[in-house]
Amino acid sequence: MAKKPAAGTSGRHEFLPKTKKLIAERASYRCVVPGCKVPTIGPGAKFDDVSNAGSASHIYSAAENGPRGRAGLTPTQIKSPQNGIWTCRTHGTEIDNNKGERYPAALLLGWKALQEAQLRREQDGRHTPVGWIHELKIIQSWLFKSDEALTLGKATLLQGPPFGKSALCDWISTSLGGKHEDRWISSLGLTILNLKIFAPEEQAIELKFDNQQRTFAANGVPVSEAPKRGSAVFFRQSAWSLYPRSDDDDDDELIGQLLGFERDVVRGLIHDIQRNGTKWGRLIAFYHEEDFEDDDHGEPVPTGGRTWTLRRGGPTGVTFRGLAGSEQERILIEFAAALARERAAFSPTVLLLDGSGWNFDDGNMALLAEYLIGQPFQTILTMRGGWQPNQAAPWWGWSRVVLIGKQYSAQIASHDW
């Protein structure tokens, strides 16, 4: 005999008619998919009739085993307007194909926020920092297959061979005004890519590397520098292992060198980390400590100088340099996330965390995934190909991009892990 399902968990939880109307009106009857221009409402067959070609679609599934699942939501939450988006008929069907694998919940929630921000601006000119990179299209490259497009979610796990992932992070950072890498200006061939950004209006940035220079175009118009359509904060895991550290460097200077920040910016971010960082990261602080050196008898004597020292756990806690390698990486991510969070209050921001194999166990990777998906900025986290989390739940809502082949082509894998 089959077991009876728990109350409130089985069956379909449909929107009420008034909820559908609210979802449609909040979307101004426009399809939520960025760039879709199909009108969903218009004149009907008769002079007093209206034709409605749109629908209120669920983000988390109305059905128990439907697209994107239910993520533990209650029936009331499933039927809430917060769980709804307005789509044209074509996109309403497309986002639910193959159990919604190409359209994770986080992506749809992001599109909903972006659409509402655009409508507020059209209504009253209200500024909003909502936005992100929607698509990266590789028009031509010696490294990648031509005309390959990557659709990025609010949080994206990018996996594959070592240099393909780093190249994409480099190019995204350069397109948003970051320091460009001279290695892409080479005789190996022309590289052209296009970034589609919603900030919140649609913007296009073209970046081109040839064997002499790199050039930009904004919405098809050549410009002399990277257009300020967004911001990138870039942490390379390799920077930590390659940086020539000196005992003479203050901790704020060392962290700044690793992340590409000024040292006073590093110190300024500590207050945000103590309020908004991870539970682990909130225990760090800078201390302006007196310097000592040993005299001829091996006794410490003050030198008159002072050093900025980062400690975790209070004035007598472990110093940054005394932490384990994985803990040092966690602190560097805390600072990178804090700057991304600060910038996201003023413009669309992406945090690029480029690593092959992070020094975290599965539990800490899960905590990192949960932390980043809840942030106001977009995240791209790179990992070696083949890595799989032991826990699927913390990665719910993450898009996953896998680079495969000798000339890399991008495939979007299931977010269901």
Image (spheres, grey):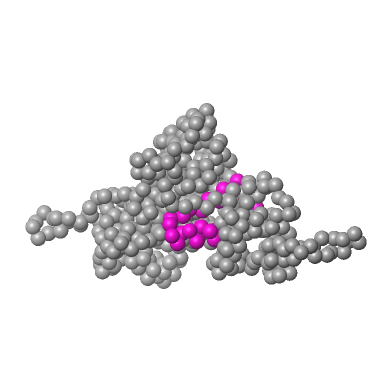
Q: Give the residue drawn at x 28%, y 64%.
A: 124
Furthest residue to the front? Answer: 304
Q: Looking at the image, can residue 394 be seen?
A: no
Q: Position of residue 267 (x, y in %)?
A: 61, 62
Of 277 and 342, nearer the camera is 342
Of 139 and 414, nearer the camera is 139
In the picture, measured across the screen, residue 166 lies left or right of residue 4, that is: right
Quarter of the image for residue 45 reads bottom left
Badge count: 0
Q: Looking at the image, can residue 179 be seen?
A: yes
Instruction: Assess whether residue 21 is covered by the magenta stretch.
Output: no
User: Height in image: 76 above or below 37?
Assistant: below
In the picture, measured across the screen, residue 267 lies left or right of residue 290, that is: left
Furthest residue to the right? Answer: 297
Q: Give the residue drawn at x 8%, y 57%.
A: 47
Q: Give the residue drawn at x 63%, y 47%.
A: 239
**Magenta residues, start to end:** 337-365
Q: Give the residue drawn at x 55%, y 37%.
A: 182
Q: Position of residue 89 (x, y in %)?
A: 27, 52
Quarter of the image for residue 281 reads bottom right
Furthest residue to the left? Answer: 47
In the picture, measured across the screen, residue 61 lies left or right of residue 369, that is: left
Instruction: Assess whether residue 340 is covered by the magenta stretch.
Output: yes
